[in-house]
Image (spheres, rainbow, N blue to C red):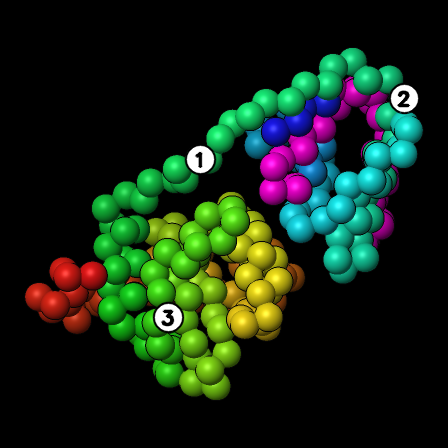
Amino acid sequence: MRLVVATCTVDYDGRLTAHLPQAKRLIMVKADGCVAVHADGGAYKPLNWMNAPNRLIEDGAEWRVVSPKGETLVITMHDIHSDTNWELGIDPGLQKDGVEAHLQELLAHDPSSIAEGYKLVRREFPTDIGPVDLLCRDEDDAAVAIEVKRRGDIDGVEQLSRYLEFLNQDPRLRPVRGVFVAQEIKPQARVLASERSIECIEVDYDELRGIESPQMRLL
């Protein structure tokens, strides 16, 4: 990971246009190519960002981040105060709690409980940035990436969005659509999912447990 503290201006041109005036900010460049611009506040959420995959072009004081969709993020450096690189290694990922892990297991056993005609390809389908909970095929044999959460919030939608960008680079799979599954999905997460053409489905954990069988424990 590369961490740059700089006085900069930021301009985004894509689904909309946005401008950040000159100020001191933290710029994070992650190993997967994600670029995020942070202020000293606002918790985890960056002021602006570009998810991987994208291309970072450094031309003197101007950084230009370009996505395959044609979105651009231009960071103009007025003064660089710190520029460091850190090797973080492979992260083991967030460990699911018991309910969330069992919910994934139940849905893997019977994906048709998500939507009629779904068939499981693999649980924990690998990508370069971590495994997708479930990869399925629908009744038309199209690939579907499914992220399973106990409570569905914006972070889960962002996570699935990153997986979809990687999966859609694979000609054997694309086009891959996304389905966000949780016991409860927050309104803000639904709005973001709709913007990114991700379907949201709420499931009843207790109802799913009613279909449990001894064979499921072998998964």
For the residues bearing labels 2 and 3, Cβ distance under 8 angstroms? no
Q: Residue 218, relative to residue 53: is it above or below?
A: below
Residue 133, x across and y down, in percent: 39, 57
Name the residue carrying label 3. 121
- What crowding class fits label 1: few (fewer than 14 Cα within 10 Å), some (14-19), or many (20 or more)? few
Mark 2 is on which residue type? His
Dot 3 falls on a residue whose secondary structure is strand
Tag 3 or tag 2, which sits nearer the N-term?
2
Q: Gap between marks 1 and 2, in whole Å? A: 33 Å
Q: Quadrant of residue 214?
A: bottom left
Location of residue 209 in the rendering, given as x and y in whole percent from the top left corner: 18, 64
Quadrant that contains the N terminus: top right
Query: Which residue is under mark 1?
Result: 91
Q: From this viewpoint, is residue 8 visible? A: yes
| Foreground pick, 131 / 24 | 131
Q: Nearer the viewer, mark 1 or mark 2?
A: 1
Residue 90 position, x and y percent, is 46, 35
Lateral position of residue 41 relative to residue 69, left or right? left
For the point 75% across and 57% down, the residue is 68
Amino acid type shown at disc 3? Val
Q: Which mark is residue 78?
A: 2
Query: Start and end of the magenta stretch?
Result: 5-34
The kind of secondary structure element at disc 1 is loop
